[in-house]
């Protein structure tokens, strides 16, 4: 297999284990490319990509933009803050106007769950979901799994124990990670205050644990999620110091474990909240490797999706 | 599908030793030479040649690398399925060096064009040469010619040349494969 089974990347849920393997194998080669003196290949020379960010993002947008540029694609950027969305234009109209300028791929970040799916039904371009509300963030899950493979030195994640810790309720990273890790055969546990764990989550086949020490003792990998203050319309826990006391990871907590798991974080970190600085910067953390791998994974996704597009000159 | 054996192990051994000898003649001690096998099938040939150079001439530390040109191909999005990429491993600097690109079969020359582009990302060699085991000389689509040739094979467009390697890295056979049975 050297083609994806899907024409868009809307969520991990739609991908097969073979798709995941193809993306990882392709990303391994791109990781080598981005470590060359000249970090650029000409594959997507005749492709134009529009990065449509209806919601704020620094890292994901930069990572996508770098991935596109390293594949030699033409890139246009759009952020909602400075657009006609403010003037009342609909999503489909906005995107169709951009596509009229001959765009092949759209990378979409939107606050509404399902925005990428909706768009894929209405416009003629390959869509990459760069985060839709609290639904999915597929490229983050892919780069997380890719980084785990690398950190553990394995080419599959069968039987690997991954704890996802923190604000699960507001996290699209959590859901994509759960789908991705399960398809790869890993075991998933979520840990956080009951108020930040969605009801019925165990029905996805994940373990739910409220005690952080138990979770860390169990885990090979701990993926620490950010407390998303900006999405919290209600007080979900009594106070920040109390959250830190129960769910913050610092060196002292790690040193009590019989073995220390690999520490991951999708960024941006609230230093001193979910992770203390000494842990975030320690040898156990692979946070910066995750960022590097993000570019390679996004190159692989864009390359494999672009491969399916009919070239303009044959039509 | 039918296949015909063109060369067996004995003949191939002679060809490989001759190619190694020719390389030795023009590169003397290989101190400023880098051998680069093209992925996926040029690597086995590059390994076999460096093995012979080590055995016959005592040249044990020849710089070698592997180059994958998939992302530089000109047929991306023109094929039914994209080609799967392979690992590139170029740990030696090629800047100012004499690079010998090594591949099993030279056919249209398009892979080589991609490889020349890909090579640029690693530096500017003083000179780049091409060694191929099989040259299908009448099928070229680009002005690319080899400097060292094992054998010429003139075959139909519908036929393919396939190399078979033994487990220990020795070249066993070269086959001519045709999709349609011979009339």
Image (cartoon, grey):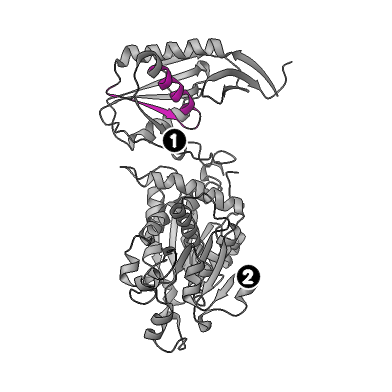
In reply to whether residue B36 is colored magenta, the answer given is yes
B7 in relation to A35, above or below: above
Q: Which residue is tagged 2?
A: A204
Q: Secondary structure at mark 2?
A: helix
- Sort mark 1 into few (<14), some (14-19) or many (20+) by Cα contacts within 10 Å: many
Depth check: A154 or A300 in front?
Answer: A154
Q: Which residue is tagged 1?
A: B69
Q: What is the magenta range?
A: B31-53
Depth check: A43 or B166 in front?
Answer: B166
B4 in relation to A77, above or below: above
Chain ID, mark 1: B
A206 in relation to B121, above or below: below
In reply to whether residue B83 is colored magenta, the answer given is no
Chain ID, mark 2: A
Depth check: A167 or A30 in front?
Answer: A167
User: In the image, A267: left or right of A221?
Assistant: left
Q: Are marks 1 and 2 on the same chain?
A: no
Q: Which mark is residue A206?
A: none
User: Which quadrant would the N terminus of chain A be assigned to in this image?
Assistant: top right
Tell me residue B56's x, y (percent).
Answer: 39, 13
User: Which quadrant would the C terminus of chain A be assigned to in this image?
Assistant: top right
Q: Please name the residue shown 41% across and 54% down the image.
A: A293
Would residue A201 be visible to someone looking at this image?
Answer: yes
User: In the image, B90: left or right of B42?
Assistant: left
Q: Please name the residue shown 29% across and 15% down the image.
A: B28
Q: Nearer the viewer, mark 1 or mark 2?
A: 2
User: In the image, B53: left or right of A169?
Assistant: left
Residue A2 quadrant: top right
Tell me residue B54's x, y (percent).
Answer: 38, 19
């Amino acid at each position: 297999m050297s083609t994806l089974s899907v024409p868009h990347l809307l969520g991990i849920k739609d991908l097969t284990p073979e798709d995941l393997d193809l993306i990882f194998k392709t990303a391994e080669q791109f990781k080598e490319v981005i470590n060359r003196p000249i970090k650029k290949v000409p594959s997507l020379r005749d492709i134009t990509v529009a990065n449509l960010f209806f919601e704020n993002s620094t890292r994901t947008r930069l990572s996508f933009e770098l991935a596109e540029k390293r594949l030699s694609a033409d890139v246009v950027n759009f952020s909602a803050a400075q657009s006609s969305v403010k003037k009342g234009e609909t999503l489909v109209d906005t995107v169709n106007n951009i596509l009229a300028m001959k765009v092949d791929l759209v990378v979409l970040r939107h606050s509404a769950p399902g925005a990428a799916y909706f768009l894929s039904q209405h416009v003629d371009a390959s869509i990459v979901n760069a985060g839709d509300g609290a639904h999915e963030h597929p490229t983050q899950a892919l780069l997380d799994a890719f980084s785990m493979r690398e950190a553990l030195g394995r080419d599959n994640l069968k039987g690997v124990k991954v704890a996802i810790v923190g604000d699960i309720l507001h996290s699209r990273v959590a859901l994509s990670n759960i789908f991705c890790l399960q398809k790869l055969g890993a075991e998933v546990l979520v840990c956080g205050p009951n108020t930040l764990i969605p009801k019925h989550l165990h029905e996805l086949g994940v373990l739910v644990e409220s005690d952080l020490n138990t979770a860390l003792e169990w885990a090979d990998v701990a993926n620490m999620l950010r407390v998303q203050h900006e999405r919290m319309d209600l007080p979900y826990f009594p106070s920040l110091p109390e959250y830190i006391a129960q769910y913050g990871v610092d060196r002292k907590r790690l040193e009590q474990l019989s073995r220390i798991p690999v520490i991951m974080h999708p960024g941006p970190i609230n230093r001193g909240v979910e992770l203390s600085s000494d842990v975030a910067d320690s040898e156990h953390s692979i946070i910066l490797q995750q960022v590097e791998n993000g570019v390679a994974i996004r190159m692989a996704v864009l390359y494999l999706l672009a491969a399916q597009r009919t070239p303009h000159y044959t039509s | 599908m039918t296949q015909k054996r063109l060369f067996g192990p004995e003949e191939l051994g002679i060809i490989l030793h001759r190619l190694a000898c020719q390389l030795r003649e023009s590169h003397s001690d290989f101190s400023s030479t880098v051998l680069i096998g093209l992925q996926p099938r040029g690597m086995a040939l590059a390994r076999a040649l460096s093995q012979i150079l080590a055995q016959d001439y005592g040249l044990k530390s020849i710089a070698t690398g592997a180059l994958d040109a998939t992302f530089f191909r000109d047929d991306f999005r023109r094929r039914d399925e994209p080609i799967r990429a392979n690992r590139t491993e170029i740990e030696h600097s090629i800047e100012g060096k004499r690079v010998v690109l090594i591949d099993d079969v030279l056919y249209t020359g398009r892979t080589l064009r991609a490889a020349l582009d890909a090579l640029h990302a690693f530096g500017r060699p003083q000179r780049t040469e091409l060694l191929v085991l099989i040259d299908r000389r009448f099928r070229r689509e680009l002005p690319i010619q080899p400097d060292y040739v094992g054998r010429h094979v003139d075959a139909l467009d519908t036929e393919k040349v396939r190399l078979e390697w033994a487990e220990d890295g020795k070249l066993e056979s070269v086959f001519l494969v045709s999709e349609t049975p011979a009339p």
